[in-house]
Image (spheres, rainbow, N blue to C red):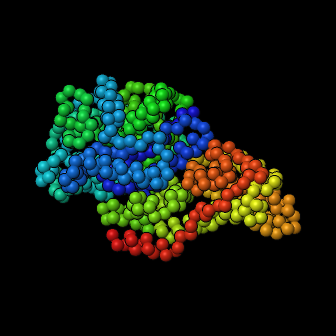
Amino acid sequence: MKILIGSAWPYANGSLHIGHLAGLLPADVIARYYRAKGDEVYLVSGSDCHGSPIAIRAKQENQSPQEISDYYHAEFCDCFEKIGFSYDRYGKTSSEEHISFVQEFHRTMYGGKYIYEKEAPQAFCEHCNTMLADRFVIGTCPSCGERARGDQCDACGTVLDPENLLEPKCSLCGGQPIFKPTKHLFLAISKLEKELTAYVDTHPHWRKNAIAFSRRYINEGLRDRAVTRDMDWGIDVPKEGYADKKIYVWTEAVLGYLSMSKNIAGQRGEDYRDLWTEDSRHYYVHGKDNIPFHTIILPALMLANGGKWKLPDDIISSEYLTLEGRKISTSQNWAIWLKDIVDRYHPDSIRYFMISNGPEKRDTDFTWREFVNSHNGELLGAWGNFVNRTLTFIGKYHSAIVPDGEINPEISKKIPELYTIVGAMIESGNLKEALDKVFAFVRFGNKHFDTERPWITRDTDPQKCADTIFTCVQMIANLAVLLEPFLPFSSAKVREWLAVDNSWADKTVPAKLPIREPELLFERLDKNVVEEERERLRQV
């Protein structure tokens, strides 16, 4: 089966923080699982490089928008490599492959019945002497009364237009913008209400936040949205009379899933259209603030284009992550930057915490105390301990060779069942539950080792000792495979030691296999780390 996994495109105007990671990491876990199953995976994403925020930052720093976005794109790529993201293609919206795809997609869409032209107000700041992107207009949300940007209210999730805000202001200078009429192309989303309603209603398995946000968006009345904008930095509009405008960012960045997967298909010598049949399965992974762009906007663009595009199957939409009890704030520098944490801590430790304690279905809080306890208690104390005690025992008492024993029959039965159960959980996006299930088996393995007491039976009953260690080796080999989507770095080491591949099927390590002296999978984190990291936060 062909599996498309689209991971949200981070905006290339600043560094990523752990909140971004929490929303993106599930994509890699799902991709690694499907590859292990033998499916053909397209894990795609990229850096969102266009729009006014980047252009304004470039002006402030006396650089070009291309230089700013390329700098952060390179930083993102470095972080993703260190954390173990296995993208099949991580591109950027400023690349020619994306630009040409988007222009052709839009050109086709402009010829259909869902695009029309009309005049609409666009915010202009007289003090800054510039047209303002929607997100640079701030004010009060007319729906909930909270502070909001001109494109969306983060408090209630309402998608907005700047002119709808109460008491609008320019976020750059604080002045009151004026709204100038200007000609634009619009996508008639309102004409697609029947199709979009049916689409959302036929996906009851989505997470509650995705269903709630999408239905609310529809029930409040679908509004037509501009697909062009007055700005200097972006993709040229492929239509005569629009030379002074660009394609609106929100209608081109989401098409990156299509452009990047087309690139992969070309590299593999495959027909790109085969990825969009009903025989494939498509996942879209992001934070809850991006839900309507994947459940309403992207499907609307696909329908308006008229191509035979498969609409998203699975929406993996995370909730919010806070930091030490406070909302993450880039402006106040209250954040743990991804570029810093990946250089200071084991990537599997970060990945484990973000899945086991992450905001999968509810808002969660990152604390350094819980992070250290998670590392020392679960990764070091449970998984690392089980591996080390078993393999060290073999080295010390069995001449570094797997003993000739028989696997415990009850455990032998549990292993294939575990592959089925955990696999189903991953496929449905229940990653925390899947990881908890595997670690329950890790703890069961440690308990089995303690109960069977091989340090005693090696003298009193050598065959029973051999059976115990042989059983533990089989458990460890299979645990390494089950954990590989979550903890690829430590799992790869264990699989190498036991000479097993990562295919999603139960493994058997043969007796008399030589075992090299194991190294520690994880080092203990000193509890002083908690205060050191908290102090680092307080200093900013």
Q: Is residue 223 left or right of residue 173?
A: right
Left or right for 149, reference 517: left
Farthest residue, direction right: 460
Q: Quadrant of the C terminus?
A: bottom left
Q: Toward which corner of the image does residue 50 lie, by quadrant?
A: top left
Specify whether residue 419 is in view.
yes
Q: Is residue 223 above or below residue 496?
A: above
Q: Closest to the observer: 313 or 333?
A: 333
Image coordinates for residue 252, horizontal then vertical, percent: 33, 38
Most foreground residue, 459 or 182: 459
- Residue at coordinates 77% horizontally, 64% vertically from top-left? 397
Q: Is residue 368 left or right of residue 473?
A: left
Q: Position of residue 208 (x, y in %)?
A: 50, 48
Q: Report the side of 346 relative to 54 (left or right).
A: right
Q: Quadrant of the N terminus?
A: top right
Q: Could you say which quadrant of the image residue 338 lies in?
A: bottom left
Judging depth in this view, the residue of 153 and 19 nearest the camera is 19
Q: Position of residue 117 (x, y in %)?
A: 23, 30
Q: In this orientation, does residue 150 appear?
A: no
In this rendering, the answer to whether 110 lies above or below 466 is above
